[in-house]
């Protein structure tokens, strides 16, 4: 499992961001892109925001500008990009939500997007995890998502004799439309201190709600949650906390344990190098990621489906990018869930 921030560091940054972030509901005719790529919002006064790569991608996708062409204009002809974007903002007007942080436009979203903020998630979930006897093993706030990975010593089991795992979960959220609120079961392996996310068993909740029509727009207006939305959000976070508690249950853990034990009996029958290559192609690993998985598979000495899954989750710790590291923990879980025919294509690769 990849190291992240301490809870004190996480809380401090969440509080800072909560004070700095601003959201706008805007008619696109009140928006414009400068030749430098900044996004200007007319909100009484005109305010300019540096535009993140993610926000650029959302603007291009919404305006149906092919990504390769959008990126080419951004790199080689920013004046042409501004002309294209501004033309379509004016010609096909619509209401959008623009999310900003630290003077930067970070998301260009539907006016039906429901802001479910990381600060509120952490405020709701962390006390419930503590009350459930969980320890946060890793937490991080990346540009796109918040992650909280926690484990409990109260629920443990063995895959093989001496190979002990504990029950855990991963709670995550994106404020910029990069994914849903997710609560996913995780197994924490004590032998290597790695987490394996069992994504198929998790909960997802997308940031979609009623259109934000409470503000009459003639241009753009800064968005603030009204009392009704605040009550709705409190009810939502209470449900998320219920899911957190339900995820940490013995029956679900035992079901996962049985899957892992079955995987430990499935051998790589042919060439482990080829097995990793086939898996790499299936999961679109980079060359470096493939090499890391192979190294950990050989070092672990467990040439089984369980061993391969653990090689993937161990490789997560080698990755610099925290988002990608968590994705590797999910891929480790996906290896366990592979249909028999797909597993055989890996196990018998030569």
Image (tube, helix red, strand yellow):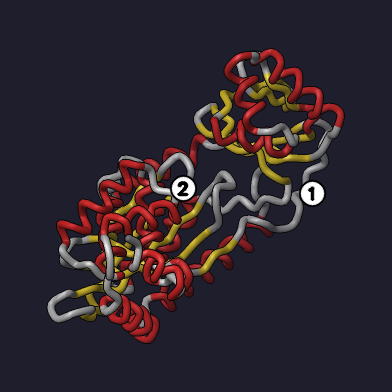
Residue at the location (23% across, 78% down)?
159
Q: Residues within 10 Å of mark 1 (few under 14, many from 20)?
A: few
Q: Please give left or right for residue 29 compared with residue 347 in the image.
A: right
- Chain-order first, disc 1 or disc 2: 2
The C terminus - image quarter:
bottom left
Q: Secondary structure at mark 2?
A: loop
The N terminus - image quarter:
bottom left
Query: In this rendering, is residue 31 above or below 176?
Result: above
Residue at the location (41% across, 42% down)?
142
- Residue 89's quadrant in the figure? top right
Q: Position of residue 221 (x, y in %)?
A: 73, 35
Q: Nearer the viewer, mark 1 or mark 2?
A: 2
Give whichever of 205, 212 is nearer the camera: 205
Q: Look at the image and tell me whether residue 127 can be seen.
A: no
Q: Please give left or right for residue 144 compared with residue 348 in the image.
A: right
Picture disc at residue 145: 2
Residue at the location (56% across, 53% down)?
116
Give whichever of 300, 46 is nearer the camera: 300
Query: In this rendering, is residue 25 above or below 134?
Result: above
Residue at the location (58% across, 27% down)?
51
Picture disc at residue 213: 1
Q: Secondary structure at mark 1?
A: loop
- Residue 37's quadrant in the figure? top right
Give whichever of 171, 337 is nearer the camera: 337
């Amino acid at each position: 499992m990849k190291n992240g921030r301490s809870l004190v560091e996480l809380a401090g940054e969440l509080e800072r961001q909560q004070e700095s972030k601003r959201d706008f509901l805007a008619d696109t005719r009140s928006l414009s892109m400068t030749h430098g790529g900044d996004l200007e919002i007319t909100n009484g006064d005109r305010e300019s925001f540096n535009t993140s790569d993610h926000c650029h991608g959302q603007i291009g996708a919404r305006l149906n500008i092919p990504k390769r062409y959008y990126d080419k204009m951004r790199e080689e002809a920013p004046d042409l990009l501004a002309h294209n974007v501004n033309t379509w903002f004016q010609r096909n007007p619509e209401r959008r939500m623009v999310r900003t942080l630290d003077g930067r436009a970070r998301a260009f979203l539907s006016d039906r997007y429901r802001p479910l903020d990381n600060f509120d998630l952490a405020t709701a979930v962390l006390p419930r995890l503590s009350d459930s006897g969980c320890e946060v093993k890793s937490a991080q706030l990346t540009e796109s998502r918040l992650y909280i990975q926690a484990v409990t010593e109260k629920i443990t089991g063995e895959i093989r004799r001496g190979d002990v795992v504990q029950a855990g979960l991963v709670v995550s959220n994106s404020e910029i439309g990069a994914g849903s609120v997710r609560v996913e079961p995780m197994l924490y392996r004590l032998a290597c201190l790695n987490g394996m996310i069992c994504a198929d068993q998790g909960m997802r909740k997308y940031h979609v709600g009623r259109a934000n029509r409470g503000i009459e727009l003639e241009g753009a207006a800064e968005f603030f949650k009204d009392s009704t939305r605040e009550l709705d959000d409190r009810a939502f976070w209470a449900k998320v906390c219920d899911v957190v508690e339900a995820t940490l249950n013995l029956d679900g853990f035992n079901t996962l344990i049985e899957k892992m034990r079955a995987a430990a009996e499935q051998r790589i029958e042919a060439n482990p190098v080829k097995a990793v290559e086939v898996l790499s192609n299936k999961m679109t690993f980079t060359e470096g990621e493939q090499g890391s998985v192979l190294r950990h598979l050989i070092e672990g000495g467990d040439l089984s489906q369980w061993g391969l899954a653990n090689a993937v989750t161990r490789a997560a710790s080698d990755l610099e990018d925290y988002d990608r590291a968590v994705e590797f923990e999910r891929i480790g879980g996906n290896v366990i869930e592979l249909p028999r025919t797909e597993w055989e294509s890996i196990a018998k690769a030569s």
